[in-house]
Image (cartoon, rainbow, N blue to C red):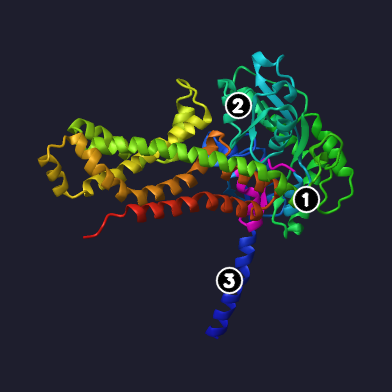
């Protein structure tokens, strides 16, 4: 009897477990994007607010489930959806052909316009992208706006500048680092409220749509989401949400009329291909896209290489000076240099890059490449100094005593006896540091420097897959780092200290 009861309890628990799990609807978004999409409630940071938050809650409610938010970086939303990290994703996600081909995408729920924002004093001077020839124009990487600027780069001669967030493009516009920003009208309106001295031209450079995404095999869930969105368009729920967040405009009723009256065909976008929208830009094949991105990847690889060599040269020069000062300097100098080394090694390099580029902007506006060079060089100088200091101290004391007996000065001893031997000892770890710096250069994309990893990320977003871009990126990094490793090994063999 007890055995039967035990089995019944186990069966009940087994049956209840999936039911309980089904009550949760995991949805992915990026709270870093901020209002009006997804942001932490200023009154209670433990809660999220935004129109995408309310739409996720609406979908969960109609499905009889409880929404559970998962923080995912915006550029990783597509890949996380494919992996099944969440069931639905929405965070101002744009409807682009590559995304619709690789994921199960909903019907559009909001229509936006790509608009040009300039400084207020330049509103008469820069009315279109053609007027910005030879100027820097900013946007988010891996978006429709970025593709739009790449086209303008070829046709109008502008310079497209890619950012990882939608805040700094506008702040850099105010500072004069860029001369224009192209982004969604939703983001432009928010920027206008946040920054003074900006003007957004009302004309649309292109039209796009926000959608809900899910894993490619979740077509049944996608169809349920489509039905929920259509019902919310009919009964005014979406209109109420967008009015609450002050983003409702005359574009939405026409979009909703088309979608509500259109046949409910699973998986159809409903608006792609409409004249004047980004859906008419065409969908080139993967092979064509790969060929079109190869020149950009090679340029980005060259930037990575130049930046890494320049930053390493700076790090080596400063590292030698710091190491020499810590070995030969007085107590005060040694203390100051020790503090520098510990601070630079004890804080994230990304934080240091932000401080140099954004934190110092009120005093000195460094170009992005120079800020990246200084950030990496100053950071790695601390590590290099420790390598050189230990190498200097590894030179046998007897040789230093012999140099003094022969009448060498301290500088002569360093230059002729100690430094050459220390260099041989430091060569291997110095080479390892250079390879590490080569990879850490990917962090400078946060300062709008489009190096190899950033360009690969943009490439992957636009074709909807990381496989080919990832392989090409890995091959380029190997092509840059392997010859250096080989050269270092040859130098080590040539300069190896003889064993007694």
Nearer to us in this view, 210 or 443 = 443
Task: Write the start and end of the magenta stretch as one range.
Answer: 74-95
Q: Which mark is residue 285?
A: 1
For the residues labelled 3 and 1, say whether their Cβ atoms are less than 8 Å apart. no
Real-space Cα distance between discs 3 and 1?
50 Å
Q: Which of labels 2 and 3 is toward the front?
A: 2
Real-space Cα distance between discs 2 and 3?
54 Å
Say whether residue 26 is visible.
no
Q: Is residue 7 above or below residue 128?
A: below
Real-space Cα distance between discs 1 and 2?
34 Å
Quadrant in which the C terminus appears: bottom left
- Outermost residue on the bottom side: it is 1
Q: Which mark is residue 347?
A: none
Which x, y percent locates residue 261? Answer: 89, 43
Q: Earlier in the sequence, mark 1 or mark 2?
A: 2
Residue appearing at x 18%, y 50% in the figure: 396
Magenta residue check for 86 = yes
Quadrant in which the N terminus appears: bottom right
Residue appearing at x 58%, y 21% in the figure: 174
Q: Which residue is disc 2 drawn over? A: 170
Q: Which residue is disc 3 drawn over? A: 13
Residue 80 is left or right of residue 239, and the answer is: left
């Amino acid at each position: 009897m007890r055995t039967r009861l035990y089995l019944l309890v186990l069966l009940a628990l087994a049956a209840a477990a999936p039911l309980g799990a089904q009550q949760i609807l995991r949805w992915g978004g990026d709270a870093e994007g901020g209002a009006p999409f997804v942001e932490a409630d200023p009154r209670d940071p433990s809660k999220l607010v935004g129109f995408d938050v309310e739409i996720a809650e609406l979908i969960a409610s109609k499905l009889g489930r409880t929404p559970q938010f998962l923080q995912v970086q915006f550029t990783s939303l597509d890949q996380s959806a494919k992996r099944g990290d969440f069931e639905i994703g929405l965070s101002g996600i744009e409807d682009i052909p590559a995304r619709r081909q690789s994921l199960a995408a909903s019907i559009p729920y909001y229509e936006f316009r790509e608009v040009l924002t300039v400084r207020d004093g330049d509103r008469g001077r820069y009315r279109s992208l053609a007027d910005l020839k030879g100027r820097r124009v900013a946007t988010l990487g891996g978006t429709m706006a970025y593709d739009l600027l790449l086209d303008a780069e070829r046709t109008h001669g502008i310079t497209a500048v890619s950012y990882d967030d939608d805040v700094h493009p506008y702040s850099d516009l105010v500072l004069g680092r860029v001369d224009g920003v192209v982004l969604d009208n939703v983001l432009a309106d928010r920027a206008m409220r946040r920054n003074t001295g900006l003007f957004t031209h009302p004309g649309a450079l292109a039209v796009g749509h926000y959608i809900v995404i899910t894993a490619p095999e979740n077509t049944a869930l996608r169809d349920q989401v489509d039905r929920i969105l259509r019902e919310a368009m009919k009964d005014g729920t979406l209109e109420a949400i967008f009015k609450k967040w002050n983003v409702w405009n005359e574009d939405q009723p026409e979009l909703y009329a088309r979608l509500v009256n259109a046949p409910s065909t699973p998986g159809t976008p409903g608006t792609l291909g409409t004249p004047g929208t980004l859906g008419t830009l065409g969908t080139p094949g993967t092979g064509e896209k790969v060929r079109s991105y190869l020149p950009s990847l090679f340029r980005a690889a060259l930037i990575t290489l130049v930046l890494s060599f320049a930053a390493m040269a700076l790090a080596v020069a400063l590292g030698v000076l710091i190491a020499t000062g810590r070995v030969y300097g007085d107590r005060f100098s040694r203390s100051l240099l020790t503090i520098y080394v510990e601070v630079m090694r004890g804080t994230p390099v990304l934080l240091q890059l932000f401080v140099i580029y954004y934190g110092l902007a009120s005093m000195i506006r460094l170009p992005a490449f120079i800020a990246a060079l200084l950030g990496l060089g100053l950071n790695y100088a601390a590590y290099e100094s420790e390598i050189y200091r230990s190498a200097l101290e590894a030179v046998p004391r007897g040789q230093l005593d012999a140099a003094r007996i022969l009448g060498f000065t301290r500088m002569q001893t360093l230059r002729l006896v100690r430094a050459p031997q220390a260099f041989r000892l430091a060569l291997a770890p110095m080479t390892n540091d250079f390879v590490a710096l080569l990879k850490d250069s990917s962090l400078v994309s946060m300062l709008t420097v489009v190096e190899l990893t950033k360009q690969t990320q943009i490439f992957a977003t636009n074709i909807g897959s990381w496989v080919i871009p990832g392989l090409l990126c890995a091959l380029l990094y190997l092509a840059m780092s392997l010859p250096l490793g080989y050269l270092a090994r040859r130098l080590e063999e040539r300069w190896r200290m003889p064993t007694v």
